[in-house]
Amino acid sequence: MFETPPEDVRLIERLLRRDQTALAELYDRYSNQVYGLTVYILRDAALAEEATQDTFMKLWNSAANWDMSRARLGTWLLTLARYSAIDRLRREKRQTPAVALDIETMVALIDQANIHDADAALVQSLIAQLPPDQIQALEMAFFQGMSHSEIAAQLDEPLGTIKSRIRSGLQTLRGLWLRAVQEQNR
Amino acid sequence: MNDNTPSTSPSQSSPCDELRDLLPAYALGALDAAEIARVQQLLKECPEAQTELADYAGLSGALAGRAQPAAPPLALRDKLMAQVSAQEARLAQTVAPAPPLSAVPAKTGSRAWIGWAAAAAALVLLVLTNAYWVNQSNTARSEVELLRAAQEEVFALTSAENLRHSTLASTESGSDNVLANLLWEDNAQTALLTTANLPALPANQTYQLWLIGEDGQPVSAGIFRIDENGIGSLIVNLPDAPQAFQAIAISQEPAGGSEQPTTSPLALGELSAT
């Protein structure tokens, strides 16, 4: 499953006691990842700064919502960041703000996964092997919070085509990943 | 696999095949609300699909790695810390005074749920009345004192300066001398309701706790039963910080609870000023 760094747990305990220096330390630990992600989503430095600030304010105001038995702090925080940035992006585009799958379910899903931090580089190389149109559909869903039908409308493609692109994309990626892990263990 | 058939079509596939088709998009967050509900239903029927889902979720999550970390401008850290300090200073100021309550006279004996603004207005008076009653009633005093002592113990056990509580007072619809308390720790997502002296209910009735938002809208916080001594308790899962709500109230509802209160509150307590 996953392990939560004890340092994160201590920082959150301090945060819950309203220790502002703990927030500063968490910012130092995670702001590069959070900002990098929000820039990637928003493609705009000023909006990304706002989304980053939103993310850490959410951390300050709702740290009690982090369930360490279900998610690493980093996963939770990056998912907060992704949802904050998507929210801003969709408001800019005047779309309905919310990603349909709620953030808690999303976080729990990601952290129940059998993929570990150590596999990150491997998974990135496997994603790069997918056909570009599949990567594009996966990215639009993940980074822009778009549903099947929104992606189909934006790309002017049939809904079924988009559904099968997303399905095949992740199914292929899973196949590649299972094979790679098998080879590693051999 | 590359056909254009919508993957939700159950025509030729078993429910678990249908689920398998939907899982990648579910893990990615690309389904709409109706499809999400369908997947969550099918997951109960096909528990073996959990492993596959966990894989898709992890692989989707790994997409975040396509974004390279980047250092934000140095000034952002100061901006964030200034915003936090300002917010905390504001909060410290707003703790003291009670919120203004609009005074609408409550109708005596009305079975309708009295207006929530009115209920909140009546609250201040009721707290005073209840305190008076407790002081006057000799018969109930020892019992009340016992319960108070028990509550003190709970307060001590749960330690901490972070502990908050709100005392609910009987309304004119409720029986005299209902004791009810909501306890929670700062930032906690759960709170503990303890009650005493609520009257016994017929089997087809239950007690229900309500959180009343700043907009006066009640939200159910759960139903509870009392034992033969009139003692009840409820662990409350809070949808938001308790301070985000104006008040809490207990009403009597049909077994199973109601979406919105159908009877007048029996006891009320203030939250936002705690």
Image: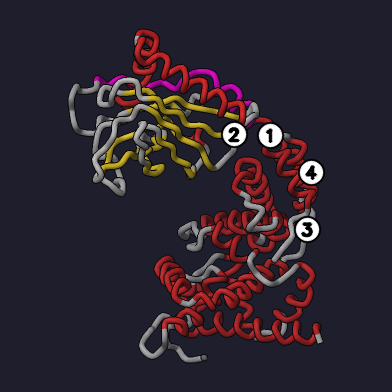
Left or right: B176 in relation to A100: left
Q: Nearer the viewer, mark 2 or mark 1?
A: 2
Q: Quadrant of residue A15?
A: top right
Query: CA–CA distance between discs 3 and 4?
Result: 17 Å
Q: Quadrant of the C terminus of chain A?
A: bottom right
Which segment did they paint magenta? B88-105
Q: Is residue B88 above or below residue A121?
A: above
* Marks 4 and 2 share the same chain: no
Q: Nearer the viewer, mark 1 or mark 4?
A: 1
Query: CA–CA distance between discs 2 and 3?
Result: 34 Å
- Which residue is drawn at the image coordinates 50% and 63% (left, top)? A101
Query: CA–CA distance between discs 4 and 2?
Result: 22 Å
* Marks 3 and 4 share the same chain: no
Dots 2 and 1: beta carbons under 8 Å? yes
Instruction: Say which residue label 1 marks.
Output: A18
- Which residue is drawn at the image coordinates 79% and 70% (left, top)? A118
Q: Earlier in the sequence, mark 2 or mark 3?
A: 3
Instruction: Say which residue label 2 marks.
Output: B186
Mark 1 Cα-neighbour bin, 10 Å: few <14, some 14–19, many ≥20? some
Give, as a three-letter code, the residue at label 4.
Glu
Res. A158 visible in picture? no
Give, as a three-letter code, the residue at label 2.
Asp
Q: Which mark is residue A25?
A: 4
